[in-house]
Image (spheres, helix red, strand yellow):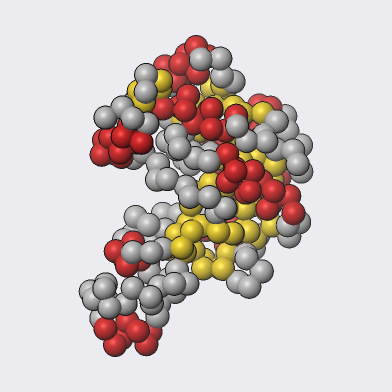
């Protein structure tokens, strides 16, 4: 299995400014993410940034880094610039690991790359996990995914899908304790992707789709254009990423800083 990992790392963040350079156990967050990716089977790991401060930090700890445009409308557009800079072939596989995942297990990086390589009908692959709390079912910040019997995505949504008509009608959507088993088929999407390079070149030429604009989920553009996304339950727990100061504190606790 041959694949590369690209880690997009923007400096700007409304909720946590300078996020990639926030220190965890004395190292910038992006270094922890890079080290996680290095433990995978990837043949290459590269950080993609639009900020000189992040570029310099990665260079300082000996990582591979590329400077990319600050004008990209999405992370997928940034990936396409990276594969163009690296002159990668259309059939090569790229795994997109978010720059705010300092605890991501190497085995799930391998898993998503392997799944894409093994499924020739898919242009992309991603992962999911069961939802165990009803609060997450109805939380619009928790993206849900519904798949067919061949593990290809039907749809991604911020809404609670699938909707258990009989149970929810009986108990109501606010009786979380009573309907704790009603969402056993509900899956949370985990934001790690493997792409074939050819898809990235197509993606940047497509206009954004109607459903993508409604849900604010760019992966819906792939489905709208008739291509398939393979989805599988993650083989290991994927701790949440860092979006807020509270998330950063939680991760620092995991590292023993607090």
In the displayed structure image, the side of residue 107 where residue 255 appears, left or right: left
Picture coordinates of residue 55, whole percent (x, y): 49, 18
Quadrant in which the N terminus is drawn: top right
Residue 127 left/right relative to 162: right
**Left/right of residue 126 with respect to residue 121 in the rendered view:** left
Q: Residue at x 70, y 30 (%)?
A: 43
Quarter of the rendering containing residue 21: top left
Q: Nearer the viewer, residue 181 or 243?
A: 181
89 or 237: nearer the viewer: 237
Tell me: residue 15, above or below residue 170: above
**Residue under the point 33% across and 30% down:** 256
134 sits left or right of 122 in the view: left
Quadrant of the rendered image containing residue 151? bottom right
Q: Position of residue 37 (x, y in %)?
A: 57, 33
Between residues 23 and 152, which one lies in front from this camera angle? 23
**Furthest residue in direction left, as rendered:** 174
Q: Residue at x 53, y 41 (%)?
A: 105
133 w.r.t. 40: above or below: below
Q: Residue at x 36, y 26 (%)?
A: 24
Specify whether residue 19 is in view: no
Q: Looking at the image, which residue sits at the far top? A: 60
The image quadrant where one finds the C terminus is top left
Q: Would residue 226 be visible to someone looking at this image?
A: yes
Q: Position of residue 13 (x, y in %)?
A: 33, 33
């Amino acid at each position: 299995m041959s694949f590369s990992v690209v880690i997009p790392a923007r400096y700007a963040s409304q909720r946590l400014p300078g996020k990639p350079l926030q220190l965890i156990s004395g190292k910038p967050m992006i270094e922890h993410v890079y080290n996680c990716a290095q433990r995978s089977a990837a043949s290459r790991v590269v950080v993609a940034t639009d900020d000189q401060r992040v570029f310099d930090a990665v260079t300082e700890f000996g990582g591979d880094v590329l400077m990319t445009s600050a004008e990209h409308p999405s992370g997928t557009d940034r990936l396409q610039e990276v594969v163009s800079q690296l002159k990668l072939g259309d059939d090569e596989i790229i795994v997109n690991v978010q720059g705010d995942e300092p605890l991501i297990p190497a085995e799930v990086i391998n898993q998503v790359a392997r799944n894409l390589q093994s499924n020739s009908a898919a242009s992309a692959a991603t992962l999911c996990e069961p939802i165990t709390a009803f609060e997450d079912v109805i939380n619009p910040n928790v993206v849900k995914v519904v798949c067919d019997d061949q593990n290809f995505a039907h749809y991604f949504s911020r809404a609670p899908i699938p909707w258990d008509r009989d149970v929810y009608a009986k108990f109501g959507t606010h009786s979380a304790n009573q309907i704790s088993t009603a969402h056993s088929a509900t899956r949370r999407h985990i934001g790690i992707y493997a792409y074939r390079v050819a898809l990235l070149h197509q993606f940047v030429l497509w206009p954004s789709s109607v459903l993508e604009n409604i849900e604010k989920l760019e992966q819906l553009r792939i489905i709208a254009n008739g291509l398939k996304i393979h989805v599988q339950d993650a083989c290991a727990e994927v701790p949440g990423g860092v979006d807020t100061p509270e998330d950063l504190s939680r991760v620092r606790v995991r590292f023993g800083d607090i």
